Amino acid sequence: MDAPCTVPSASSAAGEADLLHMRAALEQARHAWALGEVPVGAVVVKDGVVIATGFNQPIGKHDPTAHAEIMALRRAAEILGNYRLPGCELYVTLEPCVMCSGAMMHARLARVVFGAADPKTGACGSVLNLFEQDQLNHHTALLGGVMAEECGQLLKDFFAMRREQLKQQRLQAAAGEGSQENGAA
C-alpha cells in the first residue's frame, strides 16, 4: 500500500511541466464556458504527454457525472484500453469533489494536480481529504494550488457573468410585466 499523501504548496513544488499541463486544463475549462457549463477543465498526462482531455458537461449531457475529471478519465481509459491508469497524472483547474476523487483512486492515478481550492465540495483538503484516508488501498500524490489565481479567476468571472445575465433577465421580465399592465389599463 502506498503511503498517504499531503498537499504541498504549489509555489514550492510546481515545475514547468505542471504549469504547461495546467494551462492545457484551463483551455479545456474555456470550452466548458463556451457551452454555458461551469468552466472546469482537466487533462490526463502519461510520460509527460497529454493523452486525454475533458471539460465540464453535466448540463449539456444531462449527466451528473460529466465532470471534467470524469470525462478525461473515461477518454484516457479508452485510449489506453484499461480502466486502470497507472503512471498517469491528472491536472484539473478546480479541486476535485468526492465523486471525482473516488474515480481517480479507482483509476490508480499516480498524481493529481489541481488549481483553485473548492471550499464547498473539495475532497483534496478543503472540506476533507479523501486521499489521506489510511483505510483506502491506493494513495495518489496531490499537488494543490498550481495556477490557483488564474483558475479561480476564470470561475469568478464566469459566475459574475451569470449573475449579470440573471439580473438582466429579471429586469426584462419586470419591464415586460409593466408594459402588459399599462396595455391592460
Image (cartoon, helix red, strand yellow):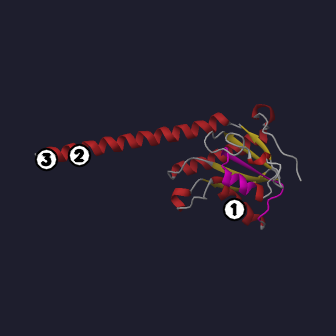
For residue 117, which quarter of the picture? top right
Kind of residue at badge 3 = Gly
Residue annotated with mark 1: 74
Identity of the residue furthest to the left in this view: 185
Depth order, front residue of 95/89: 95
Magenta residues?
A: 83-104
Secondary element at image label 3 = helix
Q: Residue at x 80, y 57 (%)?
A: 108
Q: Does label 2 or label 3 sit earlier along the sequence?
A: 2
Identity of the residue furthest to the top in this view: 11
Q: Is residue 181 above or below residue 82?
A: above
Residue 101 is one of the magenta-drawn residues: yes
Which disc is residue 183 wearing? 3
Q: Position of residue 158 (x, y in %)?
A: 51, 41
User: How many angstroms separate mark 2 from mark 1 (CA)?
Assistant: 47 Å
Residue 18 is one of the magenta-drawn residues: no
Secondary element at image label 2 = helix
Kind of residue at badge 2 = Glu
Residue annotated with mark 2: 177
The reply, left or right, for residue 4 in relation to residue 168 is: right
Residue neighbourhood size for the residue with mark 3, other residues' Cα within 10 Å, grouped as few (<14), some (14–19), many (≥20)? few
Q: Residue at x 51, y 53 (%)?
A: 35
